[in-house]
Image (cartoon, grey):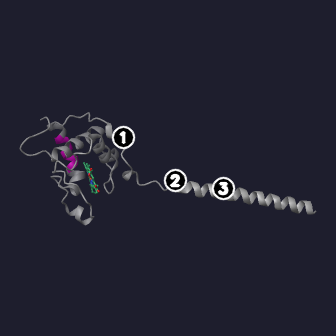
Amino acid sequence: MSTNVFTTISRLATCLALLLFVAFLFAAALPAQQPPQKAATAAIPVEAAKQPNPVKSSPESLTRAKKWWTIDCAMCHGTNGNGKTDMATDMKFKLADFTDPASLKDRTDGELFYIIKNGYQNMPAEGPRIKPEENWDLVNYVRSLAKPKSEPEQKP
Ligand code: HEC
């Protein structure tokens, strides 16, 4: 009888030790397993940032983009891209002034493509609403907003 009691106790002890160990493992793993951030705020993958723009910035490309810009972007970024809109004020968005050439100078076309496609912070994603070429058109368009009026940088 007493042997059985000992066996039971020893089994219980083993179980307890095992539980503690598992609990310890969980505790150790937790900090590394923070809930995933909103995909939109995650860093832009290097591969995406390096992607070259396959669509030339032409009047055709900019005309195609203007349609989407007017429907999907201007409400926040403004028709001319300066970001001074009621929407931005109401939502307390801090928007870059795209008419200032400095505003996007550190962004690659690939990054802009990624931001437009996947969204960015409070900016909604275009996602599959537009075709990839149209997404590149928008990259060209955003760049064209900063073009100094006097000397056009991009090819006509
Ligand atoms: C609901 C408002 C909203 C709409 C609509 C919107 N954006 Fe944005 N956009 C934002 C916000 C907010 C940011 C992030 C600003 C920040 O915090 O830096 C942003 C950031 C950007 C950036 C990155 C700027 C940077 O600092 O690198 C680009 C480029 C951009 N938007 C282009 C577009 C284009 C193109 C469209 C239309 C397809 C669009 N946005 C539609 C709100 C919007």
Query: Can you tell which quarter of the image residue 18 is in?
Result: bottom right
Task: State the image coordinates of residue 126 (x, y, percent, origin top left).
Answer: 31, 48
Q: Which of 101/152 is in front?
A: 101
Q: In which quadrant is the N terminus drawn?
A: bottom right
Q: Is residue 141 left or right of residue 7?
A: left
Task: State the image coordinates of residue 98 (x, y, percent, origin top left).
Answer: 19, 51
Quote the CA–CA distance across marks 1 and 3. Answer: 37 Å
Q: Which residue is mark 1?
A: 46
Q: Which of 69/4 is in front?
A: 4
Q: Amino acid at mark 2?
A: Ala
Q: Is residue 1 left or right of residue 83?
A: right
Q: Which residue is mark 2?
A: 32
Residue under the image location 10 percent in, 40 percent down: 152
Residue under the image location 31 percent in, 36 percent down: 51
Residue under the image location 16 percent in, 53 percent down: 79
Q: Main secondary structure of the magenta part?
A: helix
Q: Which of 123/154 is in front?
A: 154
Please tell me whether mark 3 sits on a helix, a strand or a loop: helix
Which mark is first along the chain, 2 or 1?
Answer: 2
Give the extent of the magenta segment. Answer: 62-69
**Are circles 1 and 3 on residues that touch, CB within 8 Å?**
no
